[in-house]
Image: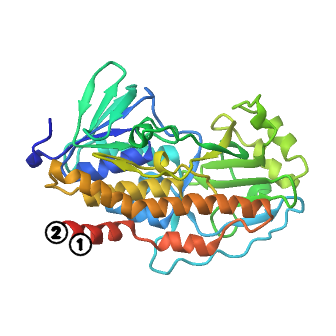
Amino acid sequence: MSSDSSSGLKISIVGAGIAGLTAALALRRNGHQVQIFEAYQNKKEVGAALSVPVNALRVLDFLQIRRENLKGVPFQNVVTFDAHSGEVISVPRPSTGARNPISLLCHRGDLYEELTNLATGEGQGPPVKLHLGVKVLDCDPENGTISLLNNQIVQADLVLGADGIHSTVRSNILRDVKTPSLSGVTLFRTVFQFHDTPELHWITEGDPGPRVFLAKGEPFRMVLMYLCRDKTLLNFAGFYADSLENEGGFKPTASLEDFRAMYHDFHPKLFHVLDLPLQAELLRWQLSVLPILPTWIRGRSALIGDSAHGTLPFLAQGAAMAIEEGGVIGCLFPSGTKPEDVPERVKAYEELRKTRGEFVRNESIEQLKSLIRNGPVANYEIHGQLLQFDALAAAQECFQQRFL
């Protein structure tokens, strides 16, 4: 039933998103036998970009990601415009320190592809086995088994639930169903093919980083955009209060005309962006957040990423928390870990990560409240705390104190 420690632990990961792939890569490098089970047949991260901040890059660099393959654009400053006058109203973003690397803005697909290639291709440790189109119906956290749609039961020494905000593994660990709550904010999101023109110089001039149009007063409306994929794509998101749409009739797709209607009184220079070719369909996404969970672990199982702390995007740290957690898992389950070690290691994981994950969740909610009150786009004190934290160093120190 359990693995021979000389050949590594047997590990099942449910979900092939950024959290699952990062953990799989870290564990593979330690010599463990990792399988990922993903419900979608054509799993890929498309349609949107993300921030890969300094604290996440520390982990990715440790896992030997190739920066050039991320095709990231440096994130040095958030430039905020008054939505109606078009004038710049932002203040410079404080430096995170001369020796710290700069955060990157990346397309999700580029990060996903790099993680997938490193996890499943040739390299250190046995390649990760990625099973697509395989739905996990149930998990026994105490015994480390998962049940698949085809009635197959897979035994492992460790099960990681990386299956997102609607996690199946979470329900098994908690023995209860915790559902996300709508935030009252929806966003339009898409990606444009970017071509610099005189009308769009305000995107490329000055410090690289997000450009934001923020409307004062009610209702809450904000448009955010930034370049990614070596400045060939423009990630584009429009946030707005949606209390009426929560009552029914929500449509997940939208048109550029829908966007124009929502932001009709914004400065005209914003609308030159809409003349760019669309790279992806314009979608609507109702933002939701998980409640604080009583635990992330049970027996031989643990939650990572959105399944543990699915939150709002207003700190740009959601993917970073998933990456940190994957790196921490790698530190706590080095080569030579025995099956009998697993329950204590997952306890250490929760102690290391739960407070930080909940901090990001709570502060993301507070940042939305601040924006609705016409506060600043970013809380730089909070951002500084998040960027400076070294998740790998914390995990390595914990391992040395508790398990050596």
* On-image quarter of the N terminus: top left
* On-image quarter of the C terminus: bottom left
Q: Say which amino acid is labelled 2.
A: Leu
Q: Residue at x 17, y 48 (%)?
A: 339
SS of the residue under disc 1: helix
Left or right of residue 356: residue 391: left
Left or right of residue 44: residue 181: right
Q: Badge 2 is on which residue?
A: 404
Is residue 263 placed above or below 376 in the rendered structure?
above
Image spot of residue 187 (x, y percent)? 71, 44
State the separation of the CA atoms marked 2 and 1.
6 Å
Q: Residue at x 78, y 34 (%)?
A: 247
Q: Find out whether the residues at labels 2 and 1 contact each other: C-beta distance under 8 Å.
A: yes
Q: Residue at x 64, y 49 (%)?
A: 235
SS of the residue under disc 2: loop
Classify 10 Å Cα crowding around label 2: few (below 14), some (14-19), many (20 and above). Answer: few
Is residue 385 placed above or below 260 in the rendered structure?
below
User: Relative to the observer, which residue lies in front, 321 or 176?
Assistant: 176
Q: Does residue 64 appear in the picture of this structure?
A: no
User: Relative to the observer, which residue lies in front, 119 or 32?
Assistant: 32
Q: Badge 1 is on which residue?
A: 401
The image quadrant that residue 37 belongs to is top left
Image spot of residue 295 (x, y percent)? 42, 52
Is residue 118 placed above or below 278 in the rendered structure?
below
Q: Say which amino acid is labelled 1.
A: Gln
Q: Does residue 169 appear in the picture of this structure?
A: yes
Image spot of residue 341 (x, y percent)? 19, 54
The image quadrant that residue 216 belongs to is bottom right
The image quadrant that residue 245 belongs to is top right
